Amino acid sequence: MRTWAVVIFAASVGLFSAPLAAHHGSAAFDTGKKVELKGTVVEWLYSNPHCLLKLDVKGPDGKVVQWIAEGQAPNVIFPGGYRRDSFKLGDQVTITVEPVKENQPMGRILESVLANGTKLGRASSAGAIVE
Amino acid sequence: MMPKSVRVLLLGLSVAGLILPAAMLAQSSRSLAGGWITPNYNIPAITDATRKPAPRRTMSGTWIPFGRFGVATQAGGVSAKPNNGRPENALSFTPYGLELYKSHKALEGADAVRPAEGNDPRNLCEPLGMPRTNHYNLNVTQFFQDEYKVAILYQYDNRWRVIWTDGRVLPKLVDGAVQIGDEIREQRFFGYSVGRWVDDFTFEAVTVGTMPEDRVWLDATGRPISDQVRTTERFRRVDNDTMEWSEILEDPKVYSKPWETMKLTMRQHDPRTDIMEYYCSPVEQANYNKFFGNSVSGK
């Protein structure tokens, strides 16, 4: 219970409200748009400058499309609860991403629901100006 | 014989004096199993009840920018003047400075380009140098000092710099180098820094002799900096747990007047805080570009 409280608090206070470390700006993203994806984890790269999640998502037509969603660097997303083993091969997870403008299956993670039901907040930069 | 009420009060104060430091440490950290302590970004503000006087002439400690997590990321440009297109944040470029700025293709700020179109030297894993190291994801920062120097250890790329306090003289800037006595010495990414205590709680550091403008940027939005820059930092101990860190640039080659780039409030943290690595790896950078960066840039 206490762990949950810490996770939720960190996500809500720390990550939802903060413009995080950005390795790149917002120019590539369709800012403000959200896409919810339910799929199967193919790979979770806990790396610099960004973490990357490869997710197989089955569309309404039954066709599987592999999405790639990025998160910030490990040290940035760690306080929000993202860990090396947050996503494991074969996990069924739900993520919400801000997609790229290029109409490709790519985006940055705004929110995640892990296989065990844990909810995590933004794992990507808002690309916002720090004021 | 003291009245009982006074004895109780003194006992209470004594106990509080013993307990308070431990309580403060606990507030500024979060412990994982086995004693591994991670930073706590949600520490409460200092109040009259928790404020302790600053120690004299020391900055030693583990410091984290105070406020919401990421407050000193400075992704949108230096904290005192973010590059957001607002008139109040416009800079007084020299003609050469403006030309330089336009040649920089930054991934952040008002004139940002897409990931693979950028020419930020950081993307090649070049050292950020001074003063950009103060403006790039400034987070957990350690200060150590002895009678000769202050060393600052930055989280990003495990970089460190030394500010000499032993009375040595700042090198003289000459064309493409610095001069120390009769010797011509090399330019450095982190320059040459000397510092002095202005008073018991204020330390001032000046840095010169940094790399030329084709090697380093001022911030992530592509604002330029030249090898003529003189960076003056002030560190003011407000109390035991609070330090203000400000920075002023003078760079007549690029800017027509000095300007303040940063004024951050730092909070002291548990000195046992474990600091995660945050680095630039050409291998991981290439991997990122392969899977993501190039694709979203139309490559």
Image: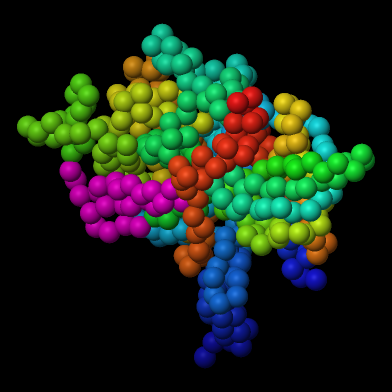
Q: Is residue B30 above or below residue A11?
A: below
Q: Residue furthest top?
A: B95
Q: Does any portion of residue A119 appear in the rendered image?
A: no
Residue A125 percent across, percent down from the top left: 65, 40
Q: Does any portion of residue B180 appear in the rendered image?
A: yes
Specify start and end residues of the magenta stretch as a single range: B144-168
Q: Residue furthest bottom?
A: B1
Q: Is residue A71 above or below residue B92?
A: below
Residue drawn 57% across the image and 41% down it: B288
Q: Residue furthest right?
A: A60
Q: Residue furthest left?
A: B182
Q: Quadrant of residue A32?
A: top right
Q: Is residue B177 left or right of residue B96?
A: left
Residue drawn 30% across the image and 32% down it: B210
Residue B88 percent across, percent down from the top left: 58, 19
Quadrant, the N terminus of chain A: bottom right
Q: Is residue A118 left or right of residue B277?
A: right
Marker count (numbered): 0
Q: Quadrant of residue A72?
A: top right
